[in-house]
Image (cartoon, rainbow, N blue to C red):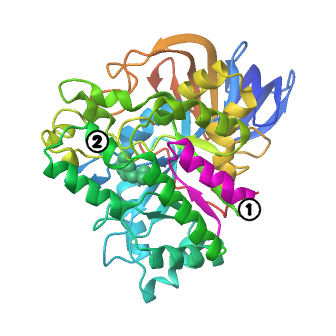
Amino acid sequence: MATTLIQNGRIITASDDYVADVFIDGDTVRMIGTALPVKADRVIDATGKLVIPGGIDPHVHMELPFGGTVSSDDFESGTRAAAFGGTTSIIDFAIQYKGKTFQQTLDDWHAKAQGKCAIDYGFHLAVTEYEAQHAAEFAKVIDGGVTTFKLFLAYPGVFMVDDQTMFRVMRSAGEAGGLTLVHAENGDAISLKIAELMAAGKTEPKYHAQSRPPVMQADGVARALRVAEFAKAPVFIVHVSCEAAMMELVRSRDAGNPAYGETCTQYLFLDETEYDKPDFEGAKYVFTPPLVGRENIEPLWKGLKLGYLQEVSTDHCPFNFKGQKELGRGDFTKIPNGGPGVEDRLSLVYDGAMKRGFSLNKWVDLCSTASAKMFGMFPKKGTIAIGSDADIVIFDPHVERTISARTHHMNCDYSLFEGWRIKGKPQTVLSRGKVVVENDQYTGRRGDGKFLKRGTCATT
Ligand code: DUC
Ligand code: ZN
Ligand code: ZN
């Protein structure tokens, strides 16, 4: 087994901040200390750099069939891009199509991902129908390392479930020790509004945002939280984009319920004015939920600081502008929903968090540790400790760079943050002890990443 010594870095975990060496044997952290009396096959000098646990993005969609096309990153290109950005674990969503068992759904997603990934990967199971035969599957799925279930309260006729199904899934998942994630909106009211906008000739990208405003997200969140309370089950709201929805979470947790949530990078920086871009460019920002008013941005950051929301993901679901987003010219309902994000999350959150006076520990927590705990991977992932997987990022906090589609590694012909100058960059990235990125080069191999069999969620 190869050994690696990372010397003199400033180790930042969600709780600690100190200068030390890290000795890695094979894929595991074996020693941490100053001036370690060991020889290693490879020595990496991390003086002046931050040494942090690899990022975890618990919300991505690689090669997802959506709106008559497929998201443009597959498990190979998407996980490689993630590695460049310092993310060493992702969780994708295996989506049940009508008539499929849970196991068949997972088998399909395993077939897509196996042997292709640059970093470790897990799955959430998105349940779109619950018949009697599915009841016994919850425990089996959890046993197989998929401990989280997802429901859509949006996209009627495609993914959306009714309230009875929501209640049954939450209850069954909860009883089996699982956690239910919810994409929460009022899909029915939204679909009427979409039809009205289209009938009135309001077909441009900005009407996507007008069709699903914050009040409809808050409504979905409130309903999901109350049904979870009724089912006596823990719940996690994905991609919270606005203050109104976040405050529903605060209310529920305040009442003693195990209710949690995340936001995504795009909602922490961008607002609805992006939809006004000319030449159909607003379509680049058509994802769901859409961008909202700028007045939501600081409340979301505050919510992260105060623990109203637990982590930051990306909902990475890229579609190229040319040939994919363009499918919706003249009809915003045909714009495939989603945007690229997995590569820049760690740096963007670093930049935004430092500007707002967050601690480095909180940054690490938001980008790695909280997800490791919430989604059953801690302490193997999400920290630097003896016995943990050596998923480690050597992060240069001083380097400034410009984000651009010309230099990113995501398979997408645009960036949501084109031309943005940000501070901080992953310099060297190790995935289970192997250097997979250094000096802007990918040094890993297709298939290095392994399926992450996750445990149950350590919610507090
Ligand atoms: N939202 C998106 O923007 N894309 C994929 C699925 C989702 O909920
Ligand atoms: Zn969603
Ligand atoms: Zn999503």
Judge left or right: residue 392 versus residue 134. Answer: right
Q: Please tell me whether residue 101 is drawn above or below residue 66 in the rendered image.
A: below
Q: CA distance from mark 1 to mark 2?
A: 42 Å
Q: In which quadrant is the N terminus drawn?
A: top right
Residue at 55% over, 55% down: 237
Instruction: Give SS at disc 1.
Output: loop
Binning the other alpha carbons within 10 Å of mark 2 as few (below 14), some (14 to 19) or many (20 upward) gives many
- Residue tagged 1: 255
Q: Which of the 4 quarters of the picture holds residue 87? A: top right
Could you tell me the amino acid type at mark 2?
Ser
Res 48 visible: yes
Q: Position of residue 385 (x, y in %)?
A: 78, 40
Q: Is residue 355 magenta?
A: no
Q: Please tell me whether residue 134 is drawn above or below residue 158 in the rendered image.
A: below
Of 113 and 164, the residue lying toward us: 164
Q: Please tell me whether residue 323 is drawn above or below residue 132 in the rendered image.
A: above
Of 114 and 185, the residue lying toward us: 185
Please give the range of residues in magenta: 233-254
